[in-house]
Amino acid sequence: MVQTIRLDAVLGAASTRHLVTRATGRAVRSQVQSALGDEAAVTCLDFSCVGLVDFSGADEVVAQLLLATGTRPLVLRVAVHHLDAIEPVLQHHRLACVCIVEERPSLVGSADGDERAAWAAVVEAGPLTADALAAHLGWGVPRAAAVLDGLARRGVLRRLADGAAAALPVA
């Protein structure tokens, strides 16, 4: 299940289309946290009708929300220009999340080469076990298992009942 929260609706209460200033970001984050549903669900923050996002707004809404909710899966639907503020903030906090940019999922923020390769393989091929990922990328199984475990802990992949890692639903 995907819970979508449209940030333009949240910002509407502040009479602005822009996620700028720390105070605005804090107010938006507070409303988003109040709206969060089931912890097992994926939450999609829809920035598609938001105009500008500055570093303070991105820090308060994206980074602080990720830090507060731990491994809760969070997907951002953003425009390319939103990444100018969101990506550096995620990197600064050593966080990563899935962003839908121009209808394509991307892993944004702090992630090493192994994490990016494994994440892309799962998105491209569909759910993969550590054995299947190892075969797909030419890695050893322990390396593949460690990377998949790390991505699941970071909330950018989800684990299925059979232990395979799958991409987050983004509908």
Image: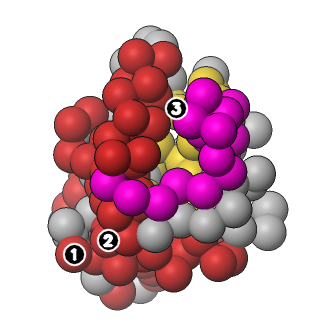
Residue 8 or residue 68, whichever sits in front = 8
User: Residue 155: horizontal and vertical position, in percent?
Assistant: 36, 46
* Callout 2–callout 1 Cβ contact below 8 Å: yes
Of marks 3 and 1, which one's residue comes earlier in the chain?
Answer: 3
Which amino acid lies under the numbered mark 2 shown in the image of this protein?
Answer: Val
User: Residue 111: horizontal and vertical position, in percent?
Assistant: 32, 76
Of marks 2 and 3, which one's residue comes earlier in the chain?
Answer: 3
Asked if residue 145 can be seen in this view, the reply is no
Instruction: Write down the quadrant of residue 29 in the picture.
Output: top left
In the image, which disc is placed on residue 92? 1
Which amino acid lies under the numbered mark 3 shown in the image of this protein?
Answer: Val
Residue at image point 60% right, 28% down:
13
Mark 2 is surrounded, within 10 Å at the Cα level, by few (under 14), some (14 to 19) or many (20 or more) other residues, namely many
In the displayed orientation, state which residue is furthest to the front: 15
Whole-Å distance between the Cαs marked 3 and 1? 24 Å
Mark 3 is surrounded, within 10 Å at the Cα level, by few (under 14), some (14 to 19) or many (20 or more) other residues, namely many
* Callout 3–callout 1 Cβ contact below 8 Å: no
In the image, which disc is placed on residue 128? none
Residue 19 magenta-highlighted: yes
Instruction: Write down the quadrant of residue 34 in the picture.
Output: top left
The residue identified by callout 2 is: 89
Residue at image point 75% right, 38% down:
171
Task: Read off the magenta span.
Answer: 7-22
Residue 48 or residue 120, whichever sits in front = 48
